[in-house]
Image (spheres, rainbow, N blue to C red):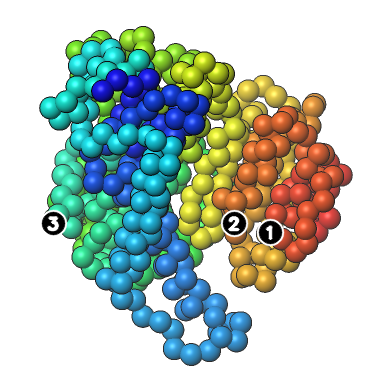
Amino acid sequence: MSYDLIVIGAGPGGYVCAIRAAQLGLKVACVEGRETLGGTCLNVGCIPSKALLHASHMLHETHENFEKMGLMGAAPTVDWDRMLGYKSETVGTNTKGIEFLFKKNKVDWLKGWAEIEAPGRVKVGDQVHEAKNIVIATGSVPSSLPGVTVDNDAGVVVDSTGALALKKIPASMVVIGAGVIGLELGSVYARLGAQVTVVEYLDAITPGMDGEVQKQFQKLLTKQGLEFILGAAVSKAEGGKVEYKLRKDDSAHEIEAEVVLVATGRRPHVEGQGLDKLGVALTDRGFVQIDKHWQTSVPGIYAIGDAVPGPMLAHKAEDEGMAVAETIAGKHGHVNYDVIPGVIYTAPEVASVGLTEAAAKESGRKVKVGKFPFMGNARAKAMFQGDGFVKMIVDAETDRVLGCHIIGPNAGEMIHEVCVAMEFGASAEDIALTCHAHPTCSEAVREAALACGDGAIHA
């Protein structure tokens, strides 16, 4: 069968691209070999991890805060099988939703794994389909380390996929890597009773994050029971034993746990699609090389999401999916890479967009910084979530917002106010003069904006 567009991969980038292209009048198919749509994000990533984060946070609240609010009675215990069932039901509801959207928008699901035989020709199983355009949206897979072998079936040394389906809650866990995935899943199991130790190669957690947020975040996670070994190079992980050397003195150490979670990032998944035969250029790090219109070195073949350079975020992939669909349909596709938020869904949440204070200063700008602590926010204190702050980075000469970093309650929701402001070139004063409902946690954003001028009211 012939199509205007075939999208390879039905993750957030791929399915959004397919749906948007169909909405724009193109005949579209999407190739996916999983039994369900949604890719890593919906099946073994974003969605199931958020289900476990929510469930474990509710458990934490019952044990830590219910009595403080006069909610008395025995605290609940954990039925792990039922919690995993809740996670699976959440995944199923979302993946079936994508299948419904495909049918609604007349997107054909080509079930199987794709190989691009030639420009305009995609083989799925024994069938070859023709397409005027092809989009590679094959996502990423967990990366590992030399000397570390992941075996999710055994359930001892696992990656993020295995950590979402452990047969039981471990008494202890070592997390290799203090990035987003490691800290989210580490906090899940810490809340469920595991002793969690995080081993990180660098000297700070969450690489690339604002320095003040890094320090506060580690402090709060430590308070929750997580332990950190920083500046440690892991050389081996086998049978629950992790061997590492401290970089400061090259001393050798060993730590043992019931489960070892390898959370050392992800790498683009581009193997098996015939890209080498086609001459599709890759970067030194194995990403598909694209131009400003997301087109690869082979005309008519595009790439988006985790398969291409940039932050490996589902919403970045979605933005690129919509943009490339509009480009193929003859419209103007656009992604503002300077305004892509990042969120860590722990408790407290951590969210950021734009430049850090250090990056803003390194760019040669004169910078103003406005901070406001959640201890000054009535709503946050009422929810026992007064830890953390909002930090706004502003150009001192123009008052234009350059970035914002939030650690606190609902940070992942509040960051979007700043995203919209930055998208429209707003100043800190614009945010400061905008009425915010009281009492809300979002008032802390306004207060941080006020702190960039004459000063916050409640600090």
Q: Which residue is mark 3?
A: 154
Between 218 and 291, the one nearer to me in the picture: 291
- Name the residue that disc number 2 marks: 410
Q: Which residue is mark 1?
A: 441
Count neighbours of disc 2 (C-alpha within 10 A) and say few if under 14, some if 14 to 19, many if 20 or more: some
> How many C-alpha atoms fall within 10 Å of the one at disc 1: few (<14), some, or many (≥20)?
many
The N terminus sits in image quarter: top left
Residue in the picture at 73% in, 66% down: 378
Q: Callout 3: helix, strand or loop?
A: loop
What residue is shown at x 27% (from left), y 50% (from top)?
Answer: 161
Measuring 25% from the left and 10% from the top, which residue is drawn there? 279
In the image, residue 338 above or below residue 255: above
Location of residue 282 by image quarter = top left
Residue 352 position in % (x across, y down): 57, 42
- Residue 239 vertical placement versus 55 (above, below): above
Contact (CB < 8 A) between labels 1 and 2?
yes
Q: CA distance from mark 3 to mark 1?
A: 43 Å
Say if residue 196 shows up in the picture: no
Mark with earlier residue (1, 2):
2
